[in-house]
Image (cartoon, grey):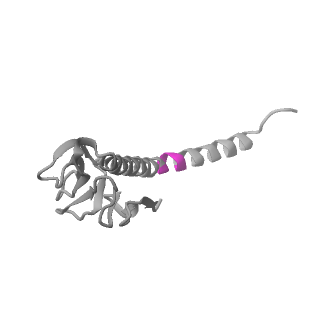
Amino acid sequence: MKGFTLLELMVIMTITLIVGTASFLSFPAFRSRNTLRLSGDELRGQLRDAQFRAISQDSSSKWGVHFEGVPNGNDWYAVFSGDTYAGGAVQTKSSLPSNLKFIDPAEGASKDVIFEKLTGVTAATAANISLIDNTQVFYAININANGLISYAKSF
């Protein structure tokens, strides 16, 4: 006789159900980590763009990125030209997705990364993003005194 027994079909269905349930339950974590990775990559790209604009002396000025850690709100950053964010011209402004926040700068604080004209160097600094509900999952962007932009991630 050819075919499957009822027991074999039940075992296959049980295994399929277990794998499907595990996949379904891990999807939100995967999506959150993917959002973090994409946001970190975008921010790193904005920093590199500001540095390139400073090196090429676009608008004949320094370029920088302003980071704002909003208390109980949606953190954001802006690319600007000029010596300071307050006195400069904002080119773009972007908000972090609602499930992410800055670790550095801290909540309620702000920070500017300003790249010098022609050289693209800046004071050594960092910008760190994490999941709101799990700060152990983060994307860290580091900028050394020579202007080298590097990153590390914990997921």
Q: Choose between 108 and 29: the one closer to the eye.
A: 108
Q: Main secondary structure of the magenta part?
A: helix
Q: Choose between 49 and 92: the one closer to the eye.
A: 49
Residue 23 magenta-highlighted: yes
Residue 20 placement: quadrant: top right
Residue 38 magenta-highlighted: no
The percent position of residue 29, horizontal first and vertical second, equals 44, 52
Residue 127 placement: quadrant: bottom left
Q: Is residue 34 left or right of 22 when viewed as pictured?
A: left
Q: Residue furthest left?
A: 87
User: Which residue is depicted at the point 28% across and 48% down?
Assistant: 96
The percent position of residue 84, horizontal first and vertical second, equals 16, 55
**Which quadrant of the rendered structure holds the N terminus?**
top right
The boundaries of the magenta stretch are: 22-26
User: Which residue is depicted at the point 18% across and 63% down?
Assistant: 109
User: Which residue is depicted at the point 35% across and 66% down?
Assistant: 145
Q: Residue furthest top?
A: 2
The percent position of residue 60, horizontal first and vertical second, equals 23, 45
Q: Is residue 68 left or right of 10 when viewed as pictured?
A: left
Q: Is residue 122 left or right of 137 when viewed as pictured?
A: left
User: Which residue is depicted at the point 33% across and 67% down?
Assistant: 124
